[in-house]
Structure formats: C-alpha cells, structure tokens
Image: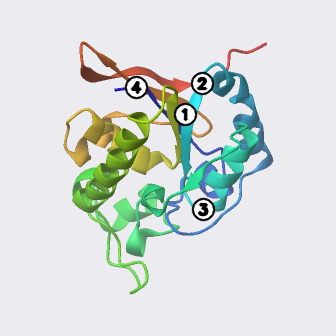
Amino acid sequence: MGDLLLVRHGETEWSRSGRHTGWTDVPLTERGREEARGLVPLIRSHRVGAAFVSPLQRARETAQLIGLQEMRVDVDLREWDYGGYEGVTTVEIQRERPGWFLFTDGVAPGPPSHPGETPEQVGERADRMLGKVDAALANTEGVIVLVAHGHFLRVLTARRLGLPPSDGALFQLATGTLGRLSTEHGRPVIAGWNIRPRPS
C-alpha cells in the first residue's frame, strides 16, 4: 500500500469565519491562494501517481495552484452535506442545541437537494473513495493525492485507520495543509499531519 497525500483547500471567507461550508461554492481568499502555492515544494518532493479533486472551486483552484497537472474530479470528495446547518457556525448551532457536536450528532435536515448527511453516510463515501485510491495505488508507483475538504478528509482518515467515522473528530486539519497517510509493518498510519512549508 503506497502513500496517500491529503490536501485541504486553502482559506475561504467562510472557513475563516467558521461557517459550515458544504455545497456552497465559495472561492479561495488571497490568503488561501498563498497557502496553496506554499505547498508546491511539498508536492514536488513526491512522485505523483494519480490525483483526485473535489468538484468544488475551492478545491479545484487549490489543486491547480499546487501544481497538479492531471487530476480526476470525483463527487465522492465533496464536503459533508451540512443540510440545515449550511453557512451556520458551531457557536450559532450550540445556542439552539447546547453541546451539539458534528461528528456524533450530525446535522439538521436541509432542502430536498441537500438534505444533510449523517457521520455514517460520510463514512460510506469515504470508504468508496478509499476503494478508488487502492485501485489507483495498485497501478502506480507514486503517491495518490486527494484535494478536498476538512471534515470529509478527517472522516476519510478515520476510515483509513479502521476507526468509525465519528473518530474523524480526532484529526483537526487546517486550511492549506497537507497530511500523509502511509503504512508501517503493513498497517495504515499517519506519517504527517497539518504539514506546511517551513518559513523561509
């Protein structure tokens, strides 16, 4: 099993203010673009065998800025569908639901087009994505790069490690950072997390 590089897109206005950003297609801020460009040396230090990217513009622009030439857009990499909590901050939600926690409590129902997802449903998407990753790893000697979103990548990490989706809560992932999932003695491990380039 080869390495998997996880890239969370750069900063957006909504990520900066803590608003849950699922399907809303917000662009990167200029700081977000700088965060993405800063990852170029880290990506170039690896031989990329295949790359997958979420269809949302904040992820696609990040993928372009980090220098990925060929990438497959995959809807399974989209962010958690927050349903009725789209655009709402955790502080605002907890005023109505004290103690609410996304990874265990899920979201309020949203409109028919975006009804929301349970942690288990996000975990199922992550499992599907990991199946595609494993198929790609079987046909390349390079690393696989996924460019996507914070909460989804946290759930995917939990599933890669054999943990329930709710354990994605353990893996805080900042914007414009890289995580590396590898193996040790044939078992999946986290080999690096929240990696940013060293200050020059």
Instruction: Give the label on residue 56, or none.
Output: 3
What distance separates the C-alpha of mark 2 from that of mark 4? 11 Å
Q: Secondary structure at mark 3?
A: loop
Q: Quadrant of the N terminus?
A: top left
Disc 3 crowd rating (10 Å Cα; few below 14, some 14-19, many 20+) is many
- Image disc number at residue 2: 4
Asked if the residue at tag 4 contacts the one at tag 1, i.e. Cβ–Cβ closer than 8 Å, the answer is yes
From the viewer's perspective, tell me whether residue 128 is left or right of residue 26. left
Q: How far apart are the two marked residues, 2 and 3, measured between alpha carbons?
A: 25 Å
Residue extending farthest front: 139
Q: Residues within 10 Å of mark 2 (few under 14, many from 20)?
A: few
Coordinates of residue 66 in the picture (x, y in percent): 71, 37
Where, quadrant-wise, is the C terminus in this rendering? Answer: top right
Which amino acid is tagged 4? Answer: Gly
- Position of 164 with respect to 130 (left or right) is left
Return the residue at label 1. Answer: 49
Residue 55, placed above or below residue 126: below
Residue 181: give x, y in percent of width and height: 40, 27
In the image shown, does 104 or 1 lie closer to the viewer? 1
Depth check: give the residue in front, 43 or 25. 43
Q: Earlier in the sequence, mark 2 or mark 4?
A: 4
Residue 101 showing in the rendered view: no
Q: Are marks 1 and 2 in contact (CB under 8 Å)?
A: yes
What residue did someone put label 2 on? 47
Query: Mark 1 Cα within 10 Å, few/some/many (few <14, many 20+)?
Result: some
Mark 4 Cα-neighbour bin, 10 Å: few <14, some 14–19, many ≥20: some
Looking at the picture, which amino acid does disc 2 mark? Arg
CA distance separating discs 3 and 4? 26 Å
Q: Say if 75 sits above or below 65 in the image.
A: below
In the picture, measured across the screen, residue 68 lies left or right of residue 158, that is right
